[in-house]
Image (tube, helix red, strand yellow):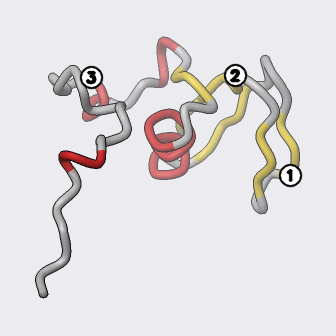
Amino acid sequence: MIEVEILGIVVTHQYGTLNTGDVLRTDPEFARHLVEDCGAAKYRDASQPAEASQDVPADAGETPSLAKTPRAKK
């Protein structure tokens, strides 16, 4: 189980409504989703998974611009 600290109001199906400062203990996949995909939580120091501490490109958390989005083939 991984611990994350909630950064704002988060509504989840599995855990209900979470508020700023709540500490959630959850599986690594959902913790990564809250931290990396949603930006709604941060890892607690001792529970950050090893794979999340690897080198990550500086623009990994940014939304891709339209210029970088590949177009569908015709």
Q: Give the total number of marks visible in the rendering.
A: 3
Kindly state the secondary structure of the residue where label 1 is placed.
Answer: strand
Q: Residue visible at 12% across and 87% down?
A: 74
Distance (Cα) linking label 2 and label 1: 15 Å
Image side of residue 72 versus residue 31, left or right: left
Name the image quarter holding residue 21.
Answer: top right
Which amino acid, mark 3?
Answer: Ser
Q: Which mark is residue 26?
A: none
Q: Is residue 14 above or below residue 61?
A: below
**Mark 2: few, some, or many residues within 10 Å (few <14, many ≥20)?**
some
Kindly state the secondary structure of the residue where label 3 is placed.
Answer: helix
Image side of residue 20 versus residue 37, left or right: right
Kindly state the secondary structure of the residue where label 2 is placed.
Answer: loop
Q: Which mark is residue 7?
A: 2
Pick the front one: 15 or 65: 65
Task: Name which of mark 2 and mark 1 comes first in the sequence.
Answer: 2
Q: Which mark is residue 16?
A: 1
Image side of residue 56 versus residue 38, left or right: left
Q: Position of residue 18 (x, y in %)?
A: 83, 37
